[in-house]
Amino acid sequence: MSSLSLRQKSTPLMFLLPSLIIMAFILLVPIIMGLRLSFFEWLMRDISKEPTFVGLRNYIELFKSDNFRTSVFVTIRFVLSVVVIEIVAGLILALLLESGLKGMRFFRTLFVLPIMVAPVVVGVMWRFMYNPSYGKINYLLTQIGFERVEWLSNPDIALTSVIIADVWQWTPFVFLLALAALQGVPQDLSDAAVVDGANYMQKLLRIKLPYIASILGVTAILRLIDAFRSLVVIFNLTYGGPGVSTEVMSLHLYKSAFVSQRLGLASAIAVLLLLLIVILSLGLLVSNLRNKEN
Amino acid sequence: MKKIGLIAVMIAILVSAAVFAGGQQEAEQAPAAAESTDGFDWRQFEGQTIVACWPNHGHYNATMKSGVIEEFEELTGIDVEIDLLQYIKMHDKQVLEMSKASGDYDMVSMVVMWKAEYAMGDMIEPLQPFFDKPNLAVPEYDFDDLVPGYVEVTGIAGGENIYMDGPGAKLYGLPFGSETSFLVYRQDLFDEYDIEVPETYDDLIEVSKFVHENIDGVGGLTMRGASGHHATHGYLLHASPYGARILEKGTWEPAFTEPESIKTIEFMKKMVEYGPPGMTGYTQDEEWQAFLQGDAAMYLDASVFTGAVNDPSKSKVVGKVGYALHPTAKTAGSETGGFGLAIPKNATNPEASFLFMQYLTMKETERKIIDNGGAPFRMSSVNDPALQEEYPEFEVLAEQLKYANPDWRPIIPEWGEINSTIGININQALTGEKTPEEAMEDAVDPIRDILIRAGYIDE
């Protein structure tokens, strides 16, 4: 009897095993290799030679490096800004377009277009628009009587410019998910609230938002992870400049690997980046689950 | 309805096929050059294919426009494929390809700053063995006619200071798209406002200030300033005349905190103030555009720029420009840089690639490339009175080459990392985030670390 139950228990595991093995190979192995490499010095120009073990030197160097510290702060500022702005803006857009007014389908399609643009194109496009001499944005600003803005060449403004481009591209993603969630709110709940005399704000705060909170939470996690890894737009827009004011960790990693050619150091940055993402996502995930239980 | 649409599509396809076929035929009928070579067997590698990694750069674009590649293919029966990349991004791809057992590239175009790294890393072939083989060396090639400064900076490594000529040095590349720097200015504005062409850096400051204050919508000098490589390039252009150095000769200690260096950065800050808007974010592209669009009165950088200046499809200032020598400060010194052609060690068809390399850099080919907006690299061309007549900048170029500084920057294998580190700090000084002194001081430790790690200096 007992052996049968063991087999019964293990059968589903056996079915899962092939996919688990594949997952382990394509996910865990690279991570472990990366972790291992972070304790080595391996120059890209000497890639045919064996890496040399240097212990914790790469990590110590990173913690001492001003540029790395700046890149951590820049990353956190960038990620928090885009996630908060995109969630709020996407939600507002979804609420506005939720009702079945005429012409709304057109706008819904229109708003989704930016997601489909390749990030390289987004970077180049915004770089043209921000150009101080012939960019459209400064042209429009001067037409309506404002001063030209040094979008990409002023260290105090450049990060904002990058955030604007990211928000432009990814708010529609939040909008789509929020819209889908809102459409899942049962109509009878809303109707009952209206009968009870609830106004729009009450309906929103008491019924809709709590109902879609968990989906918004997942959306936030998805955006958070994505924003941490975002490289292409910044790469094309500012390449980290002016100074290091827009050099996010992923770009710092890229430069360590391909400009400085230090693959070990780059792996150390990758490990730290992974840690940061895991900690922040776990935090969000746990609070999200707790909300759900409540 | 559907049928008519189908027929229309088919007609369109047929017509376009006919048009394209016509184009191909024309290309095939193009006359082949250099066929007169006595007894040299151009067709010994017939049927091979070579892949070249080239930059999207004026000189290379001119080469492709001029039809010399098709002529080479016809002459030799070798197929040429070009992998065209943005120049600053070529490095990563080339290193990756060259570190494989068998790479995709038979020819790479390398920016001079990668030369020592490739040569010392044993990634590219020394060229002398190729030149020594009678069946490979084209008899009328005339190596000595290549601009000597260009050959040294683009092709020679392993001598003095690793990146220069001297005992132990070998030839690894040939100049192609090489450059020095000179001043390009708006003749029309200078005439209209009665401005004298600057000869010294003090003049340059004065003229920039004058333009900034008196000519609406036009800045003084256009300059690269974007964080990293571009800011360093901008700095080096002015550091050489000011007598500033990145590293001390002999000891390899950082020397960029010296007064000459600070003076160079202060000069650059003035240029940012008097120049077109946003220069602290300028890469080479923005630097060029500012002059080509008429937003800047002067340009002082790579000489290959003239191809774009004279191209009406790119430039609003065709026929409105004059050329002058790179202004002097403490000394006269212009840049040496640009691109050289090299053959990877792991190339599949190195010999065919060597033929292509020679063909591209021969006198007849050079003329065709110049006619399409490319840059000269043979002394006979810059000194040719007929060409000087046609291209007024050649006269200035011939004179400027005497002052071209082959030790313009310390292009040791670690230069990429140094370049990037110091460029971030220069940019921070230009934007006002740090003072010039602070910025350069902040770069000392990271750069010493790089040099210590590589064994140039002790802790």
Image (spheres, rainbow, N blue to C red):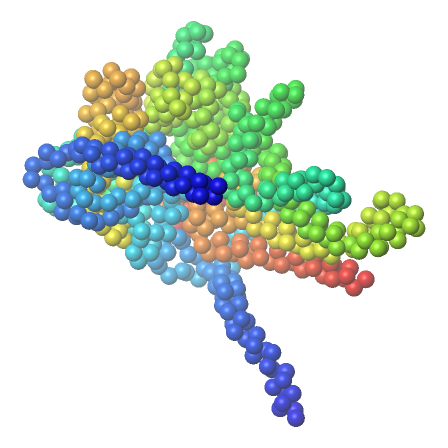
Which residue is drawn at the image coordinates 10% and 40% (left, top)?
B40
Along the line of sight, the residue nearer the viewer: A86 or A272: A86
B24 up-or-down from A278: above or below? above
Name the residue at the right extreme. A196
Residue B265 in sight from this viewpoint: yes
Residue A135 vertical placement versus A167 (above, below) = above
Locate residue A232, reporting x and y percent: 52, 45
Q: How many marks?
A: 0
Considering depth in this image, is B149 or A195 the residue closer to the camera?
A195
Residue occupying image coordinates x 51% and y 59%: A56
Which quarter of the figure has residue B33? top left
Query: Which residue appears at 38% of the width and 44% of the height?
Result: B91
Residue B271 lies, in percent from the top left, at: 49, 22
Please indicate whether residue B458 sits to the left or right of residue A214 in the image. left
Is A202 on the left-hand or right-hand side of B214?
Answer: right
Which of the pair A58/B375 is nearer the observer?
A: B375
**Residue A165: where, in percent of width, then height?**
60, 39
In the orientation shown, which residue stands out farthest toward the left?
B39
Q: Nearer the viewer, residue B372 or A176?
A: A176
Tell whether B301 sits left or right of A183: left
Residue at the (29%, 17%) spot, across then down: B392
Residue furthest to the bottom = A1
Q: Is residue A39 visible?
A: no
Where is residue B28 drawn, in percent x and y?
Answer: 22, 37
